[in-house]
Amino acid sequence: MTSTSPPPARSRGLAVRSRRAGLALAAGALALTPALQGGTATASAASEGAATAGSAVEWQLLHEEDFADPLDPGGASWTRETYDEPFDTIMDDDGQWYRNDYGPAWEEAMGSFDTYRKEFAVGDGGWLTASLSARDWNKDGEIEQPPSITNGTAGGEPVARLDVPDHTGGAILRPTEQLPDEYRIEYRLKTLDFGGKRNGSIEYDGRINGYDADGCKTQHPWGEGSNSPGWEGDASAPYCEWQDVREGPYGYNGFHYMSIVDFADPAPRNNHFWHYRRKVLMDSFAQHPDRVGGGTGGRICDASTGRYYDYKDSSFNTVNMWISGMPNWTPGQGGLAGNSQWFMSSCSGGVAEQQLSSAGELQPELMPNEDYTFAIERDATGYTLEASGNFARSGEQTLRFHRPFVVNNAPIWHYNTKPEEYDGRFDGDLVQNDKNGSTTWPDQWPQGSAYPDSFVIGDLYTNVYEGSASLTDLKMFVPQDEDQDEDQDEDQDEDQG
């Protein structure tokens, strides 16, 4: 994969400093600064993944969208997906991985329905793209429950409303062009209804963990792998006998507040595909109590005390702030390819740890009168993840963590957007030796490679997640132009004179 040039900047004349450079940090934000030398972290405590206030970049607003203008005024049409141009041959919807695991029965399962896609431009100059995916269950050309991204209002403000009425649909906002080498993306989340408890119960409004209570809802035809629990692992099994997404050992709902993925023009796909394509992300993980079982379900940080509490004692409306690390190059039979997962929170001092640890817990009942801001930055040293708002237990917080590209020889997956940022040291062959076939995908991170950044906001999974959300004030910043910065300083001097 190779990088292409970012779109030309059209300055709106508004400069914004990063919070370290100029904005006061809200309560709970940490301010340790990591050092990065020669592509590896130094041995200081801060460099070992500590939370930071971010880089000293001064940001200039390039694009903003408040969703007051009509969305999809031309009425974009749905087009049947043929998979003639897959994102990869591994775990994309029609990927070889499933054939090697499940055998010929999987192709019959995959062919039992049609998938349709729709995309339309959004915002100034079409800098955003809305991308949707839907399932035509009986292949008659009619989509039974189409997802949508439409105009709406929440808390008296215009919003984009993302609605996914069936878990086999998907709806995301993404950049139309790949992101530049340094950027800040932010927005305000006004409402969220993708699972979790309401008033102490996982069942509310006739739904179970955010899912419609009627009928079967399973991961078919992209199961967790033939050797995973929750089903018999037989791809010829009827739809309802695949792994249940609503309850059971794989029962969970969720939402991607924002992910940075490693390719251009992303579109909704099955959830296993995404576990091999993300760089950094912030998401919700609303587990059903069946999945939690007798364990803790993970842990959640109370940023006001610096102590964790058990996921099982929460409302399940989590905020996970994490990075993708190196994959397992040789998963076992009936398993899946995927990257290691490293979670950051105030309770770990911002150190990214390989243990499910949520940085905070949202309070959907407060929305839309109160909202949450999410942002991701990329600078010359790494990525910064940020979430702010009124969190359960910890109150008003700005949670902000910077992770260098490489810490103690542990990289962020596919971090390099240009070939010269990476020397090939983490390259490897992905090898699958499975029940019905074997394939080797060589050089998954070779020297000379480059992986353009794209952000994804919404429901990007087409075999799990169901619900609705709304957002506004989606903004893109780029580094302040030095010439313009000097001009502004001169203007300020004249004004003061």
Image (cartoon, rainbow, N blue to C red):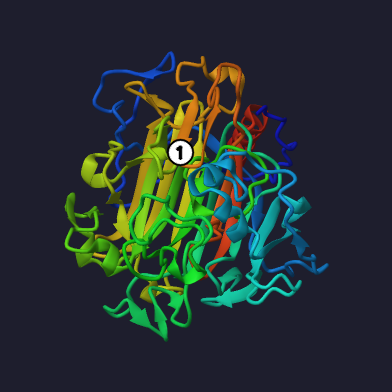
Is residue 454 placed above or below 148 in the rendered structure? above
Residue drawn 43% across and 13% down? 38
Is residue 72 visible in the rendered image? The answer is: yes
Relative image position of residue 176 (x, y in whole percent):
71, 47
SS at circle 1: strand
- Location of residue 85 (image quadrant): top right
Residue drawn 17% across and 62% down? 294
Look at mark 1 in the image and give the residue it sits on: 434
Is 405 in front, or is 278? 278
Is residue 20 placed above or below 145 in the rendered structure? above
Relative image position of residue 122 (x, y in whole percent):
72, 58
Relative image position of residue 155 (x, y in whole percent):
51, 76
Quick one: label 1, few (<14), some, or many (20+) residues within 10 Å?
many
Is residue 6 placed above or below 298 in the rendered structure? above
Relative image position of residue 252 (x, y in whole percent):
38, 64
Quarter of the image with the N terminus is top right
Work out which residue is located at the far bottom of the displayed protein and give it. Answer: 206
Give the total number of marks visible in the rendering.
Answer: 1
Residue drawn 26% across and 78% down? 200
Quarter of the image with the C terminus is top right
Residue 413 left/right relative to 81: left
Is 385 in front, or is 459? 459
Is residue 457 placed above or below 213 in the rendered structure? above
Is residue 496 visible in the rendered image? The answer is: no
Give the residue type at disc 1.
Answer: Asp
Is 205 in front, or is 304? 205
Residue 7 left/right relative to 103: right
